[in-house]
Image: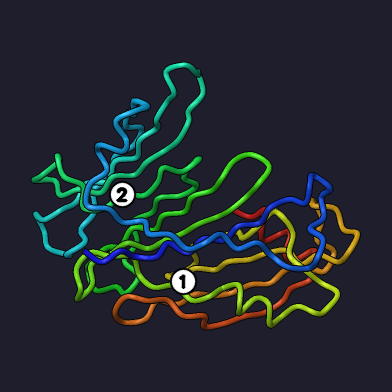
Amino acid sequence: MKKALLFSLVFLSAGGLGWFLGFGRHVRAMKASGRLTAKSKFATPPCETVRSMFLYFKGVPGQQNEVDWQVCRDPDSSSPSSQIVHVRDESDEDRDLWTFGPADFFQQLTIVDFLRDGRQELLEVEESGGTGHYTEWAVLGRTNSGLRCWRMPNVNEAANKLIRSDEGFGSKGWTLKLTSGHLVVGEGIYHEGDGACCPSRGGVFLELTPKQGDEFVVSKAWRADAQTFDRWVRSP
């Protein structure tokens, strides 16, 4: 089974100073996210399902898949240690078709029909906790090659084309929103001396549009002022 790449975007705070010096970004290495099974790896700590969903990857009535969102707890701690998402055939609940995680937490699991062809996809967004921050996202769906994560464009490369020499990206990372069948990602633009809370140069936006098949492309890229960017980030 081919392993898909889950695009990872990592932004580490510079020693808690609130400003990422050097006007660049730390990009987490892309990792393979799909596994045929993960039972042995996730045997400990114990995990419990907190949410289940059903979707139709094939778009065929009666042939549905089950998605189990699980929280795993360390027996020696009262707080969750990680989260995992299992994707299975409803008819074979003992075998994983795909897994996401372990992750600190999943920000979003959404069922979408991006191509409006009756076949559904799973949008998965995960985030890290702690002082370092990253946001990862993937779209899992049925393709001509089977079940796999759709290819994503290099968002870092596209965003860097829109900033000036005295600007950079801080530690907050990307924000992703689903809008009218598209993915829109935004990131704040910082000028030297800005606090981590407040990118004074506004933000960069990229619209990611699904193409027929198994990939997304950057269909639109633009900048916005600080007030517009802040309002977008805070909106539902």
Q: Position of residue 186 (x, y in %)?
A: 63, 66
Q: Residue at x 67, y 61 (%)?
A: 232
Q: How many numbered badges does the structure rendering display?
A: 2
Q: Which dot, 2 or 1, sits closer to the camera? A: 2
Q: Quick check: 233 above or below 223?
A: above
Asked if 47 appears above or below 211 in the picture, the reply is above
Q: Provide the secondary structure element on which disc 1 rests.
A: strand
- Tag 1: amino acid: His
Q: Residue at x 46, y 69 (%)?
A: 180
Q: Position of residue 84 (x, y in %)?
A: 37, 41
Q: Earlier in the sequence, mark 2 or mark 1?
A: 2
**Amino acid carrying mark 2 in the image:** Thr
Percent x, y for residue 132?
Answer: 65, 47
CA distance for labels 2 and 1: 24 Å
**Residue of label 1:** 182
Q: Going by the picture, which residue comes out furthest to the right? A: 193
* Residue 148: image location, x then y, percent: 28, 65
Which residue is label 2 attached to? 99
